């Protein structure tokens, strides 16, 4: 029997929180054991949470999801954070990844893709929505115009970036 994936969802919109929880729990192998409506709410509960993954919105009332991840990332015992948001501004994407997020999933995708992304994350992957993967690869392409860092990548690393650019997920790559 597979180990159940334990999730904490940090989302300020009550309807999105409820619908996301319902989607995650469809197959029975993911359990949303805690929901929080703000970063501050999460911060009060995080020490006592036994979860594998925290799905964190960015646009929260009060402290942003990025700032929350940054504050929590210093604790080695923290679970993996994946941003789950509508925000796809390149600055926010890279700020979230620099803060310690291990994945970046845009809301509004197909439910089966969300479940697949959570499984990827639980297996050690870094799921990103295709639109975010494109943003990341375009950033590398822009960096290539200014430096030779991209040339330093191995053939396998370039192939992975190419596959991300095509929108493939972790398992497909």
Image: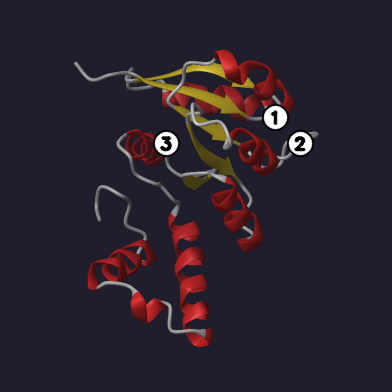
CA distance separating discs 2 and 3? 28 Å
Can you identify the residue that label 1 sits on? 39
Image quarter in which the C terminus is found: bottom left
- Mark 3 and mark 1 lie on one chain; the one further toward the N terminus is 1
Q: Is residue 62 above or below residue 48?
A: below
CA distance separating discs 3 and 1? 24 Å
Q: Is residue 38 above or below residue 107?
A: above
Give me the residue at 60% from left, 20% from top: 46
Tell me where residue 40 appears, x and y as whole percent: 73, 25
Give me the residue at 45% from left, 52% from top: 129
Can you identify the residue that label 2 sits on? 63
Is mark 1 in CB contact (under 8 Å) with mark 2?
yes
Of tags 2 and 3, the one toward the viewer is: 2
- Mark 2 and mark 3 lie on one chain; the one further toward the N terminus is 2
Q: Residues within 10 Å of mark 2 (few under 14, many from 20)?
A: few
Q: Nearer the viewer, residue 19 or 75?
A: 75
Q: Residues within 10 Å of mark 3 (few under 14, many from 20)?
A: some
Tell me where residue 154 appears, x and y as whole percent: 27, 72
Tell me where residue 135 appears, x and y as whole percent: 51, 65
Of tags 3 and 1, the one toward the viewer is: 1
Residue furthest to the right: 62
Q: The residue tagged with tag 3: helix, strand or loop? A: helix
Tell me where residue 47 appears, x and y as whole percent: 59, 17
Q: Residues within 10 Å of mark 1 (few under 14, many from 20)?
A: many
Can you identify the residue that label 3 sits on? 111
């Amino acid at each position: 029997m597979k180990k159940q994936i334990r999730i904490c969802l940090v989302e300020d919109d009550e309807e999105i929180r409820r619908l996301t929880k319902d989607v995650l729990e469809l197959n029975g192998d993911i359990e949303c054991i805690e929901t929080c409506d703000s970063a501050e709410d999460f911060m009060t509960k995080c020490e006592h949470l036994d979860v594998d993954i925290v799905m964190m919105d960015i646009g929260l009332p009060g402290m942003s999801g990025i700032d929350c991840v940054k504050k929590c990332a210093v604790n080695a015992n923290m679970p993996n954070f994946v941003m789950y948001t509508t925000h796809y501004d390149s600055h926010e994407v890279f700020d979230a990844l620099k803060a310690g997020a291990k994945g970046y999933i845009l809301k509004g995708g197909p439910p089966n893709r969300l479940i697949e992304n959570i499984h990827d994350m639980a297996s050690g992957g870094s799921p990103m929505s295709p639109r975010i993967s494109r943003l990341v690869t375009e950033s590398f392409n822009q960096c290539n115009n200014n430096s030779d860092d991209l040339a330093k990548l191995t053939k396998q690393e370039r192939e992975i970036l190419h596959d991300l650019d095509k929108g493939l997920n972790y398992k497909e790559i």
